[in-house]
Amino acid sequence: MTDPAANAPAEALVTARPPRNQWLDVWDQFKTHRGALFGLAFFVFIILMVTVGPLLWTYDATFIDIRARNQGPSLAHPMGTDQLGRDMFARMMAGGRVSVAVGLTAMALALMLGTFVGVVAGFFRKFDGPLMRLTDLFLALPLLPLLLVGVLLFRERLNGLFGPELGIFILIVTGIGITSWMPTARIVRGDVLALKEREFVLAARSIGTPPRRLISRHILPNILSPIMVSATLGIATAIITESALSFLGLGFPPDFPTWGRLLFDATDYLQQYPGRVIWPGLAISFTVLSVNFIGDGLRDALDPRIRGR
Amino acid sequence: MLDDRLEGAPRKKALVEVRGLKMYFPIHTGLLRRKTGDIKAVDDVTFDIVEGETLGLVGESGCGKSTCGRAVLRLYEVTDGSVRVDGHEIAHLGPNTLRRMRPTMQMVFQDPQASLNPRMTLASIIGEPLREHTRLTKPEQLERVYELMDQVGLNRDFANRYPHEFSGGQRQRIGIARALALNPKFIVCDEPIAALDVSIQAQVVNLLEELQDRLGLTYLFISHDLSMVRHIADRVAVMYLGKIVELASRDDLYGDPKHPYTRALLSAVPEPDPREESRIQRIVLQGDVPSPANPPTGCNFCTRCPDVMDICRKVDPEYREIAPGHFTACHLYCETTTMPAEPTAAKEAFEPIQQGE
């Protein structure tokens, strides 16, 4: 190791090779996780379907062709039509756009809130008690009744401000976001508490790293795995909660398709046309599953101890 | 007393001056979490470290060595006392001024695995102090990191690797390189070799000595390995239950230990020669270390001391200089300041008390 002769060729080699971007290593490891790759491919497919798809597809999601109602799958309507003759495939794509958008934004909001509360509570002792009691308070709130009350109270006002669709979107996203950050906060707090007693955090303090950079450089990267897990679970619960709200008829307006609303509308015809329930149900399940796989692969790829194995 | 001696002696100035350092951790009990007491991890410790020397700090587990080292670097909020490093009082500095002092004093940690962030590459670990305290550009930083890696004997090719890919000795070298990054004057080595193999221990200690010669570093070397301290330290302080019981130059301390605890410690050092080994008379201490939350009245060591006297259980002995440069806190040496009392006589005189226990 200290032999100068052995060092010489290595030095020449290194001067030509600056530190490699860590994200390339992460991608290399991610590629080896087959489930994660499938998940990523499927998720990209879903995203493309719901963003580009409606532009290419001939039918509009709200176009009513009353003579073609309740049709089975055909070339013109791959998933059939509903009771008003609207094309199910177009409605699936339009609905997916809302569901995925709600899932991602609500998850991001819940994650930021949860991580912030967890890190502050874990790292700064004096905030620990108050913040954790606040978390307990939120955990004790029943989610669905709260959302229902929220929708009833604020729907009109937000509709007036942002229009009916964006208004209800903001309402649902904030509603889901502020009622689902607590598990993340608790997990993050626990990990931060354990982590800040580790010697490398002490070493960073002895170097003189201020708390904010100590958190961003040493704490956050090391609590990435629990955050990642809550993120993937968060997307799933957000999509499902939105579906539940739409299913209860309190989400988006009735003519505005989301996966949950499609499910809700289709249950009346469950006996005659089960396909209409299956498609949105499958879409929700597979999206959630793909996100879980991506999260799993990402968590492994971000851990250098697992990387390269 | 200490100051007088230092002023009188034509020696180099003290880089680190610790006076009456106290580090108490509060104990909260009951439903209301009221403060019911203190764990006196470091209780009124006073010493100096002269520029360029190595002060060894030894003692058994839990006696407050590491806490003392960390408190000296102000990694804890000290309860009381003063710590001067390079002429600046740091014991009660605000966070911003303290941050500017950080480059002068650094630390090497005990567990090289735990003291390196597993998610950072070697280059970013060693480069962290540079990012925090210098305005070097990225290539300049990298150049300095390579320089440091050469200094501690790490292959430059390792810069992109992660801590888990290294052996214990290499990890400790990374820790040393990080401590050296800002050209510190004073390094606290908190049991830097305790977690390493014996063969690697020698490498790391030799590296530390070599760096000291080359860069003129001052070490506070915390260890429980007495023979290693004998090898590296110029002066040695012995701690027991949060207090320094004896401080002397290495040769004085190992050749002529005064405090009964030091004698017991030294008699426990293993002897490589089996013929010598069989001849050694071990002083085996009875009982356990008392709790630092509830230390005995009088001398802290009175519960286990083989030479215990009545006064030991009542009065806390004064920490005083009994010979030039030889400090101890023991009632055995209280009557005469220059001539130490006959330890054997004292032992015989108080034998009955010991047996009565």
Image (spheres, coloured by chain):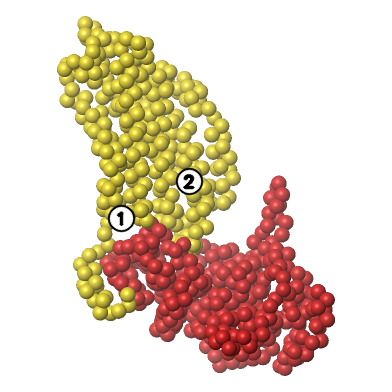
Q: Chain ID for label 1?
A: A
When asked about the image quadrant of residue B347, the answer is bottom right
In the picture, one chain is yellow; tell me its letter.
A
Q: Colour of chain B?
A: red
Query: Which residue is located at x 43 percent, y 18 percent?
Result: A248
Label ID, residue A308: 1
Badge 2 marks a residue whose secondary structure is helix
Residue kind at label 2, given as amino acid type: Val
Q: Nearer the viewer, residue A250 or B306?
A: B306
Which residue is the site of mark 2?
A188
Q: Residue furthest top?
A: A67
Q: Residue type at mark 1?
A: Gly
| Residue B76 occupies quadrant | bottom right
Quarter of the image with the C terminus of chain B is bottom right
The quadrant of the image that shows the N terminus of chain B is bottom right
Of marks 1 and 2, which one's residue comes earlier in the chain?
2
Quadrant in the picture for residue A139: top right
Residue drawn at x 47%, y 20% is A152
Question: In the rendered view, does B73 fall on the left or right side of A283?
Answer: right
Q: Is residue A108 visible?
A: no
Nearest to the eye among marks 1 and 2: give it. Answer: 1
Q: Is residue B39 left or right of residue A11?
A: right
- Secondary structure at numbered mark 1: loop
Q: Is residue B318 visible?
A: yes
Give residue B8's position: percent from left, percent from top.
61, 92
Relative horizontal placement of residue A205, taking residue B356 as reference (left or right): left
